[in-house]
Image: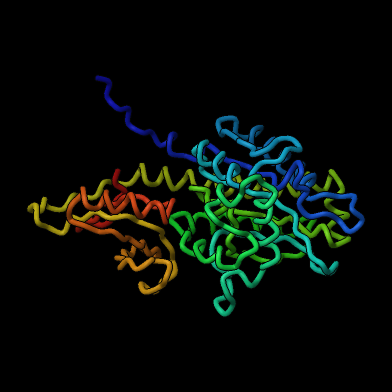
Amino acid sequence: MLGLMPLRAEDLKLRTVVIDAGHGGKDAGAVSKDKKSYEKTFTLSIAGKLAERIRNEYPDVKVVMTRSSDKFVELRDRAAIANKAGANLFISIHINSSVSTSPNGYSVHILGKSSDKNRDLFAYNRDVVKRENSVILLEDDYSTKYQGFDPSDEQSYIFMSLMQNAYLEQSLLVASIISEKLKGGPIKADRGIWQNPFYVLWKTAMPSVLVELGFISNQTDLAVLKQDAQRDKIADRLFEAFKEYKAVYDSSIDLGQNKTEEPKAPEQPPVTTVRYGTQIFASSKNVDPKDPMFLGYDPVVVNIGSLNKYIIGISESEDEARKANVKIKDKYPGSFMVKLTAEGVSRFK
């Protein structure tokens, strides 16, 4: 019987990135006021340029595009492509739009509730969220495929608030780097980083961001987007963001490999504090254990530095915890099993 090869640090680095060119085919996305420019065209151009830059400088990184031509790709399939590829990062590229011609600028979005605690789930950017999710309505039998999710129904977004999973912190890091790199670029106005319930981010099991690169409804932004040289510059800035994030991602692996192993605590008798559970997400924010997002579970919160790990379905029995994990993963797709000991929390398979 062949033994398992130990994982090397190289194997754990950022090796696969999925670049999602928003819309495509029969889904034009946002359209300019004169009906001559389409979101799907700009997103494909910028996505292709970004992919080319990554491939040229990082030949060891696998770059997957959800589409490389003007074709229609179902929303759920975009996430499925990223999950199947085992991607370490998902970047979805879009162009914004508004009824008014005055809004302009870029914004970066990660999965979550509306960023303003005084607003409802997706009150801010409501139109953006509905528009980006509405592609579902172009698909055949969408109500079956998306298990009743209706992009026009606000109630459908409540469940998305549960999906602030273990990738939230990394997604926020990616978003922060991208936002910083876009400053001073062709699209001038910085509209900030937002947490919003985009379906394509909900279903990706990795750090994921959605970038709105200007407003097609604004004449200044549109003039920029129509120029190939300017789209080159935008792609350059996204590539610089990728480089920085990859450096941070890879260095964290190196640091982990180079750490001196801590001496293990004395082995405890069988009826000790060793327990098993399912980590549903980690966040630097303190979340009320009574929050509806916990679906009635009583979470255990383990603090690691500035990070809080939220764990549910805990049992001293590994078998019982595994049974609970099966049900939990239906509600929290990004969750995973962990082992809790006196030494801390470790991922457990």
Count of numbered labels shown in the rendering: 0
Q: Quadrant of residue 108?
A: bottom right
Residue at the bottom extreme, as displayed: 118
Image check: 128 left or right of 146?
right
Residue in the foreground of this view, choosing between 122 and 248 = 122
Q: Quadrant of residue 292?
A: bottom left
Query: Residue at 73% across / 39% down in the picture?
Result: 49
Quarter the N terminus occupies: top left
Residue at the left extreme, as displayed: 269
Query: Residue at 71% across / 41% down in the picture?
Result: 72
Colour scheme of the picture? rainbow
Query: Residue at 89% across / 53% down in the picture?
Result: 35
Could one spot residue 309 in this view of the protein? yes
Quarter the C terminus occupies: top left
Query: Residue at 44% across / 48% down in the picture?
Result: 252
Could one spot residue 233 in this view of the protein? no
Image check: 314 left or right of 109?
left
- The image shows residue 91, relative to residue 123, as above or below, that is above
Q: Position of residue 178 (x, y in %)?
A: 64, 55
- The image shows residue 242, relative to residue 331, as above or below, that is above
Residue in the foreground of this view, choosing between 51 and 123 = 123
Q: Position of residue 217 (x, y in %)?
A: 84, 61
Q: Position of residue 106 (x, y in %)?
A: 72, 60
Residue in the foreground of this view, choosing between 240 and 222 = 222
Residue at the right extreme, as displayed: 34
Q: Position of residue 198 (x, y in %)?
A: 60, 57
